[in-house]
Image: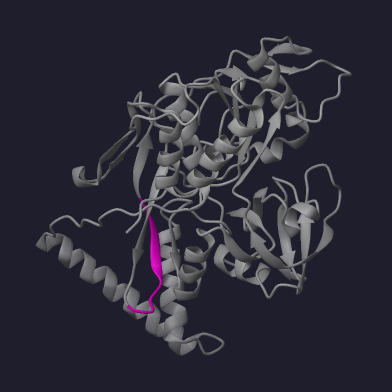
């Protein structure tokens, strides 16, 4: 099985595989387990016999497994056979739907981020939006899997979402036309003598795409290339092996990430190999509150190894690893949290995130605070292990000065040794 890092995002999933080890059972524990299973069997039979409508055994069992696993933490869940098949397709970078990464909060579907160039992004869906209904059917009472299934459909078909948005007095409807979502994993262009690379998620095309981007930018700019901006903002994560490979592309040696689980056999450490594809050129990594999971691994590795400056706002803080454990034939799979991951310095990202070297706000964070939710705000999250570091001051655009992308402008000027128009505000004042 493959190893993955996973963000709490519903419609686009990453995952991590590791051996499933069960501790030796004791007779007292066995007896207690059998009693609890007898209790479950009694409830199962009563529901099947007395519920207001007929329910199948598979419907009840699937719901029971989903309830058991999803109660553990926000990232553990059960996938039936269809959802498992869909997930395997998604990690290849192409799937059907509207193109949003979501989680469930307070009974509603919450948008973490729309995927670039998808129906959701083109329709103006924003991070932090809540989806209250799908085709006029309330989301309240649906599982996340049920809700995402309702949003998927044949390319060309339409779906209507009822959206709640911070600052809007009333819900409003958004009509979208479903499409085959081709996830453009890597986008890049030159900014004069600087190469800009945006990595949108960590599917199977992440590392190959970054390598192609660097090669192309080297050809476009020539030997005078000053450095590279790696944009991981609103990157929800994905495959752990791709996060390791992307980190390795910029490192010559040293640890990239380690994982620690309940059992020592689950522990692992991943090191870099010689060969920096940029030839040692300076790197600035952009992060924000939507930077999660595998993208935090890359940011943490490059920061701890002092290979890059991390610029932006504190990341999401999703520092756990999920294992995909296939069940019996046709039975789907469990997505189960089995380990935490740690940066080379031993820092656990879980519920803490990556603190940037230079805290730079885009300037609109106060208007979209609902979108800046972190792992620490998710009900049932795994607790952080160490106090979170906080930036002492935050750089913001100067009042009245307009930027298309202030964080990027600041990074470009920093790379060139120029001064950006801005003002500095203490973090405590925000």
| Closest to the observer, 307 or 123 | 307
Q: Residue at x 67, y 73 (%)?
A: 153
What residue is at 38 percent from the left and 63 percent from the top? 334
In which quadrant of the rendered view does residue 270 lie? top left
Q: Quadrant of residue 77?
A: bottom left
Coordinates of residue 269 in the picture (x, y in percent): 28, 37
Quadrant location, the N terminus: bottom left
Q: Nearer the viewer, residue 14 or 278?
A: 278
Q: Is residue 29 above or below residue 229?
A: below
Question: Is 393 placed above or below 101 here?
Answer: above
How many numbered circles are shown? 0
Q: Tell whether 166 sits left or right of 25.
A: right
Relative to the observer, which residue lies in front, 28 or 270? Answer: 270
The answer to whether residue 378 is above or below residue 76 is above
Residue 408 on image: x %, y %:
70, 26
Asked whether residue 334 is drawn in magenta, I would say yes
- Name the quarter where the C terminus is drawn: top right
* Residue situated furthest right in the rendering: 400
Residue 312 placement, left or right of 124:
left
Q: Residue 430: tell me if it is visible.
A: no
Q: Residue at x 79, y 54 (%)?
A: 122
Describe residue 86's horizontal placement relative to residue 119 as left or right: left
**Residue 229 in the image, given as x and y percentages of width and height:** 61, 28
Residue 176 as seen in the image, left or right of residue 7: right
Residue 363's place in the image compared with 267, above or below, is: above
Q: Nearer the viewer, residue 207 or 144?
A: 207
| Residue furthest left in the image | 27
178 within the magenta span: no
The residue under the point 28% across, 72% down is: 37
Question: Is residue 26 something that shows in the picture?
Answer: yes
- Which residues fall within the magenta stretch? 329-337
């Amino acid at each position: 099985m493959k190893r993955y890092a996973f963000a709490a995002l519903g419609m686009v999933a990453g995952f991590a595989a590791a051996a499933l080890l069960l501790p030796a059972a004791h007779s007292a524990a066995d007896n207690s387990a059998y009693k609890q299973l007898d209790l479950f069997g009694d409830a199962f039979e009563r529901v099947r016999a007395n519920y207001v409508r007929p329910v199948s055994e598979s419907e009840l069992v699937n719901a029971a497994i989903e309830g058991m696993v999803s109660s553990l933490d926000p990232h553990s869940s059960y996938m039936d056979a269809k959802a498992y098949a869909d997930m395997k397709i998604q990690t290849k970078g192409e799937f059907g739907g509207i193109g949003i990464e979501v989680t469930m909060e307070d009974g509603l579907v919450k948008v973490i981020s729309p995927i670039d160039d998808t129906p959701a992004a083109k329709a103006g869906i924003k991070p932090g939006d809540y989806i209250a209904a799908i085709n006029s059917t309330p989301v309240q009472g649906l599982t996340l899997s049920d809700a995402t299934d309702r949003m998927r459909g044949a390319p060309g078909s339409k779906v209507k979402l009822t959206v709640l948005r911070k600052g809007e007095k009333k819900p409003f409807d958004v009509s979208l036309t479903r499409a085959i979502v081709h996830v453009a994993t890597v986008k890049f262009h030159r900014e004069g003598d600087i190469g800009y690379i945006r990595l949108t998620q960590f599917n199977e095309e992440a590392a190959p795409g970054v390598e192609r981007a660097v090669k192309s930018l080297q050809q476009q700019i020539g030997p005078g290339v000053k450095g590279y901006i790696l944009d991981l903002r609103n990157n929800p994560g994905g495959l752990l092996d791709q996060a390791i490979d992307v980190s390795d592309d910029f490192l010559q040696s040293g640890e990239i990430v380690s994982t620690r689980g309940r059992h020592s056999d689950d522990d692992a450490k991943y090191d870099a190999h010689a060969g920096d594809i940029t030839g040692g050129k300076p790197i600035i990594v952009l992060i924000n509150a939507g930077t999660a999971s595998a993208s935090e691994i890359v940011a943490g590795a490059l920061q701890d190894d002092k290979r890059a400056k991390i610029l932006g706002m504190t990341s999401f803080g999703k520092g756990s690893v999920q294992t995909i454990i296939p069940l019996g034939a046709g039975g789907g799979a469990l997505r189960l949290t089995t380990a935490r991951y740690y940066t080379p310095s031993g820092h656990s990202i879980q519920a803490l995130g990556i603190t940037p070297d230079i805290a730079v706000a885009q300037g609109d964070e106060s208007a979209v605070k609902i979108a800046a939710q972190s792992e620490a705000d998710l009900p049932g999250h795994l607790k952080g292990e160490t106090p979170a570091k906080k930036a002492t001051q935050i750089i913001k655009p100067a009042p009245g000065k307009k930027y298309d992308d202030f964080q990027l402008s600041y990074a470009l000027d920093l790379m060139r040794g120029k001064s950006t128009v801005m003002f500095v505000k203490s973090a405590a004042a925000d």
